[in-house]
Image: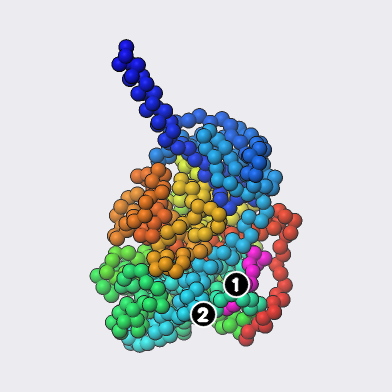
Amino acid sequence: MKHMKKLSFLLCFISFTLFLKAGEWIRINQLGYLPVSFKIAVLMSEETIEINRFSLKDAHTGQTIHSFTSIEKTGSYGQMKSTYRLDFSKFNKKGTYYLVAGKAKSPVFRVNTDIYDGTADFLLHYMRQQRCGYNPYLKDSCHLHDGYIVYHPTRTNEKIDATGGWHDATDYLQYTATSANAVYQMMLAWQQNPGSFADKHKANGELGSNGIPDIIDEIKWGMDWLVKMNPEKGVMFNQIADDRDHAGFRLPTKDTVDYGWGKGTGRPVYFCTGTPQGLLRHKNRTTGIASTAGKFASCFALGAQVLKDFYPGYARMLGSKAGDAYQHGATHPGACQTAPGGAPYFYEEDNWADDMELAAAQLYQTTGNPQYLEEAVQYGRMEPVTPWMGADSARHYQWYPFMNVGHYLLSNVNDKRVSREFQRNLRTGVERVYENAQSSPFLFGVPYIWCSNNLVTAILTQCRLYRETTGDEQYAEMEASLRDWLFGCNPWGTSMVVGLPAWGDTPGFPHSSYLNIGIGTTPGGLVDGPVYGSIFGGLIGVTITEPDTYAKFQSSLVVYHDDISDYSTNEPTMDGTACLTYYLSAMQKDGNRQANKITQQPEINYSHPVIE
C-alpha cells in the first residue's frame, strides 16, 4: 500500500508537471483589425483540450467586454494536438483588447480604422535600402562599374552602363524578372490606391519632400534600370551577376567579387539569347525570351500611364518602347530563366504566356488597339490558372509572377463574354487555393515552397482584385486569414515583415549583411517565409545559429526560423516586399472608408514641377 501511495503521488506529480509545461497559444493579427472585417484568431494547444467559449477583454482594465461561442474545432496541427478558430468578427467597437480562451491569452491588439495607415509606405524603407548605385541607407554608392555583356554574339565583354535598380535580396544579384514585377506591382498599388502614399523622401531616397509621392520615386528608380536593361529595340538583358556573388556577408559598397575583369570592377550583364545559359557548372533551361520581353512591355505600357503626370516626356518614351518589347516577345516565345553558376539554384520560370497576356492587355488599355485585346485573350487561354494554385509543390519561382494581373485587366473589359471568362479564371485560381486551405486551422492553402510568403502576397492580390471586380465575397474569410498569416496569425506567432508592427513579434535576425555587420536591420522587408521541412533539410549551406525560440511550433511538415543563417525562411526579398504594397495600400483605403474619409483619386497638385 505504501508503495502504491508513492506511485500514485509520483503519477500525480508527473501529470501536474506535464500540465504546467503543456502550452496553449492564441495567434492573432498583431497589426489589429478594421472594425468591419473578419476577425478570427487561432488557438493552439500541445494537449487535447475542449473549448466552447472565449472572451474579449479590455487591454487597459482587464474587464471582459464580450464572450463568444463562435468556435470551430480544427483538429491537430504539427505538434499541436488541438486547434480552434475563434471568430469575433461581429465585434466592431474601436479599442485595445486581448483574447482569453482556456489557459491562453493572446497578445494585445487594436480594433480601429487606422491600423493600416502608413503600412504600404513602411515597406518602401526596404526598397530604398536595396537600391543599387546610390544607396540612401548607406549614403554611398555601389556597383558603379556595371557591367560587361556576356552571351551576346558580337558584343561580349563590351562595357555598358547598367548601374541602378535594386539588389534582389541579401545577395547583390539583379534580375529583370523580379525587378519588372516589383515595378509593375508598385504601379498597380499607386493606380488603385493613390491616397495611401505620402511624400517624405527625395528622389534619391534621402529624407525630405520633393513634391512627388515616395512610391512614384521608387517606381521611377526601378524603371530607369529597366530602360537600361532594354536600351534599344531587340536588345534585352536578363540579369546582372551570378552566384559568384555568394561570397559571404559584406556591404554592397565593399563588394570586391572578381568576375574576370578585376575585383569589384564590373559584373556580367546577361544578354537574352533565348537559349540555355550558365557560365560555370550549371545551366538553366531557357526556351525563349517572351517571359522577359512581356515583363518589359507591361511595365513600359503601364508606366506610360502612371508617370505621365510627373514625367510626361519620359512617359511618352516608355509608351514607344512598350510595343517594341511586346513584338520582341511575340517573335521569341518561351521562358527566359535566370542563369545559375556554381550551385544549382536559379529562378526556374517555366511560363511565359502570362507575361505576354499582361503585356497585350496593358497595351490594349493604353492604346485601345483591338488587336492587343484579341492577342491578350489568346495568350490568356494558354494559361487560365497560374499552375501553383492548388498544387502542393513547385520548383523555385517556376510559375512567375505568382499571379497574373492580365486576367484582372481582361475581366474588366467591355466585352461581356471575355470579362466573364477571365473572371472565372480568377475565381478558379482562388478556389483551388481555398480547397487546399480546408485542412488548415489557419485556412492556409499556399504550398510551403521557397518564398512561400511571395505566393501569399500574390493570392492576396488575386483575392482582392477578384472580389472588387465581381462583388463575390465567398473567399473573403480566406483572404483575411492570408492577410493575418503575414502579421502573426500563424503557428509561430510572428509577423513576416521586419519591424511591422513595431510593438510586435517580428523577424529580429533576418538574413542580412547589415545585421551581420552590426549597422542595422531590414525594416519593411518581407521575409521568404516558412518552407517544407524536406526543403529546409535539402538546401546547401543553410544552418541555424541562434537558439530556436519557435522550436515548439516546428514540425516535420513546415519550419520557420528567425535566424540570420536561414536564407530559406528568413531572408527578405525585394519583389515580395514590393508586391505587398498593393494589398496594404488597399487596406488603408478600406480603413479610410470606414472612418468616413473616403479617399478619391486626387488631382495632381504637387509642389515639384513635372519633368519633361
Tell me which label, 2 or 1, sits earlier in the chain. 1
Q: Which residues are magenta?
A: 194-203
Q: Nearer the viewer, mark 2 or mark 1?
A: 1
Crowding at dot 1, Cα within 10 Å, few <14 / some 14-19 / many 20+, comes out as many
Indicate whether 580 appears above or below 30.
below
Residue underneath mark 2: 224
* Amino acid type, residue under disc 2 in the picture: Asp
Q: Nearer the viewer, residue 34 or 382?
A: 34
Residue at (42% x, 65% y) in the render: 515
Q: Residue furthest left?
A: 281
* Amino acid type, residue under disc 1 in the picture: Asp
Q: Nearer the viewer, residue 48 or 89?
A: 48
Magenta stretch encompasses residue 197? yes
Q: Is residue 446 left or right of residue 280?
A: right
Q: Nearer the viewer, residue 419 or 197?
A: 197
Residue at (57% x, 37% y) in the render: 100
Residue at (66% x, 56% y) in the render: 114
Image quarter hosting the C terminus = bottom right
Q: Position of residue 231 (x, y in %)?
A: 46, 83
Magenta stretch encompasses residue 129? no
Residue at (55% x, 35% y) in the render: 101
Residue 460 position by quadrant: bottom right
Numbered mark located on residue 214 in the image: 1
Is label 2 in contact with label 1 (beta carbons under 8 Å)? no
Numbered mark located on residue 131 in the image: none
Residue 413 position by quadrant: bottom right
The answer to whether one can see residue 401 in this image is no
Q: Is residue 243 left or right of residue 495?
A: left
Image quarter hosting the N terminus = top left
